[in-house]
Amino acid sequence: MMKYSEPIRGIDFHCHVDLYPNPTEVIAACEREQIATLAVTTTPKAWPQNRQWTERSRYVFSALGLHPELVGERHREIALLEEYMKESHFIGEIGLDGSPQYYKHWQVQIEVFTRALDAAQRLGRRIVSIHSRRAASKVVECLEERTTSDRVLPILHWFSSSMAVGRKAASIGCYFSINHQMLEHNRGIRLVRNLPEDRLLTETDAPLTFIGERKSEPTDVIMTTERLAVVRDISVVELRRIIRANAMRVFRFTDV
């Protein structure tokens, strides 16, 4: 288990370690390269194996999830998610997706998401990594209605909504994990430039994102931090300090 004094070169708060061909190699690389990583899952059935892979890691933590893109076919697994949540302080990836191909399951998505939030609130000290594509306003509404900031710490993964929604999310305690693809277009840059400094985290969403022709890896958060420093117009050293301080605040929420 990582200690506060452990050296950290980068922080990846949203990575699908189990989607790589060899997850144990990725975890070993995180250890070697000193990348603190939240390994999210897309279905609760995947979590026991992920927990086993990461249980001896100083840097990689396994999160328990039920991805909104899969809810249409796997919504009955919400009961398993709720049961496993008793054992995990890290929840993710959960959330809502308003894209056309998933909107037909919108009401089921809301039911699953709110049940997960209710469980997190009831159990307390839960960190939740949240998918909010085309659904950020509803995600924030659900968080405000179902959770309190002393019991649930939400991280909006790859947040892409408006600055108004971002301000609202920050006001109820949300953090924002930033990946390099968010910094590749003007709209994303404007948004990221204006998010609160004390709520910024970094992520890769690897291996679902790319650096050129190759799939992203957790170590790519080092490059993301450098790009983010340019966008925020501060030194890389100062931004690293900010990201680390924010991450330690998140980890302390669970008493890790």
Image (cartoon, helix red, strand yellow):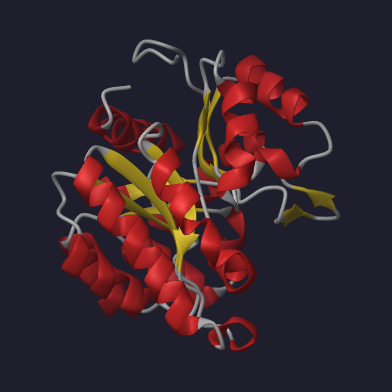
The part of the image, by quadrant, that contains residue 18 is top right
x and y, in percent, of residue 255 in the image? 26, 23
The N terminus lies in which quarter of the figure? top left
x and y, in percent, of residue 23 in the image? 74, 31
**Measured along the vertical axis of the image, is residue 1 above or below residue 18?**
above
User: For this view, does 26 lie left or right of residue 58?
Assistant: right
x and y, in percent, of residue 115 in the image? 34, 61
**Measured along the vertical axis of the image, is residue 115 above or below residue 197?**
below
Residue 109 appears in the picture as rendered: yes
What residue is at 56 percent from the left and 16 percent from the top? 57
The part of the image, by quadrant, that contains residue 45 is top right
**Measured along the vertical axis of the image, is residue 124 above or below residue 33?**
below
**Measured along the vertical axis of the image, is residue 91 above or below residue 35?**
below
The C terminus lies in which quarter of the figure? top left
Depth check, front residue: 115 or 51: 115
What residue is at 41 percent from the left and 63 percent from the top? 192
User: For this view, does 252 lie left or right of residue 4?
Assistant: left
User: For this view, does 24 lie left or right of residue 188?
Assistant: right
Depth check, front residue: 10 or 172: 172
Residue 92 appears in the picture as rendered: no
Depth check, front residue: 12 or 18: 18
